[in-house]
Amino acid sequence: MSASRLIASFALLLAGIPGPATGAGSRTADRPGDATPAPQHQVLVPAGPFTMGNDPGTPGAHGDEAPAHRPRVDTFAIDKHEVTVRQYRACVRQGRCSAPVRRGSRTRPRYYDDPASADHPVINVDWYQASDYCRAQGGRLPTEAEWEKAARGPRDQRRYPWGDRDPDCSLANFGGGDGCAGDTDRVGARPAGRSPYGVHDMAGNVWEWVSDWYDPAYYGRSPGANPTGPRWGAFKVMRGGCYETGPAGLRVSCRNRDLPTSQKPNVGFRCAKPTR
């Protein structure tokens, strides 16, 4: 982590001010822009409203998931899978991305450099590195609303990407050391757990960075179309749970957050592209 990013992180935490005005931390860089239709590694999510969040009192829901609301989201494309070590290493070789400082995972000391991990999600990347990768591919991180729509679908308030059935290891990688894999797993290894749009691993495996700043009360004032989160904040939102979480963290409405400079072995990302 660079000294400038560390200093910026502490400033954000203490004062709630925005990230750098230019470069990887810019809010301008996160806003939807022009993009081409979905390539083969992405799926198209059509425009329209969906139910986001949960009403107060919903079993298992946290306060920052309320109230349930129905934003309209424009058409966008999103990666079918979490970005893999193989994909990220290619970006590093091209000089467009920076390599993770930590090379290991929870159980694999050589994770980033081990060919056996090539098709597992890249981890130990902060929000800025994730954003840089997506921009290098001509996209951006998905907004929180885009992520939840891609996970939940347009017509119901399902608890998980696959529906309301309780999770098991055929549907998601979760549960910690005594759970399914005890670490990351190959992306797309559980097709039965994909979302209504065909997006894989939106529950478990790794938490995923999205573009939005975190505000626990944002849903109460979220706009009716294409919400992009608050303008400022100290933390960035993460979605989807990870291999360490229990069933509650796998819910499509579950929100998590961390400093944008945080680099952890249970956090990765996927990219999105607007299509207008």
Image: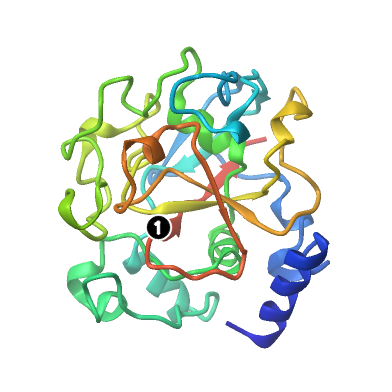
Q: Residue drawn at (75%, 55%), measured in percent from left and top?
A: 233
- Find residue 101 and report its image quarter: bottom left
Please give the residue where the numbered disc 1 appears in the rendered image. 83
Q: Residue drawn at (25%, 26%), measured in percent from left and top?
A: 166
Q: Badge 1: few (under 14), some or many (20 or more) residues near its Cα, within 10 Å? A: many
Q: Residue drawn at (63%, 45%), measured in percent from left and top?
A: 35
- Find residue 19 and report its image quarter: bottom right
Pick the residue in front: 156 or 54.
Answer: 54
Q: In this view, does 70 lie to the left or right of 110?
A: right
Q: Residue drawn at (17%, 49%), measured in percent from left and top?
A: 180
The three-letter code of the residue at mark 1 reads Val
In the image, residue 24 above or below residue 3: above
Residue 38 at least partly seen: no
The image shows residue 247 at horizontal and vertical percentages of 32, 36
The image shows residue 140 at horizontal and vertical percentages of 60, 53
Q: Is residue 257 left or right of residue 86?
A: right
Colour scheme employed for the rendering of this structure: rainbow
In the image, residue 246 above or below residue 260: above
Q: Quadrant of the N terminus?
A: bottom right
Q: Quadrant of the C terminus?
A: top right
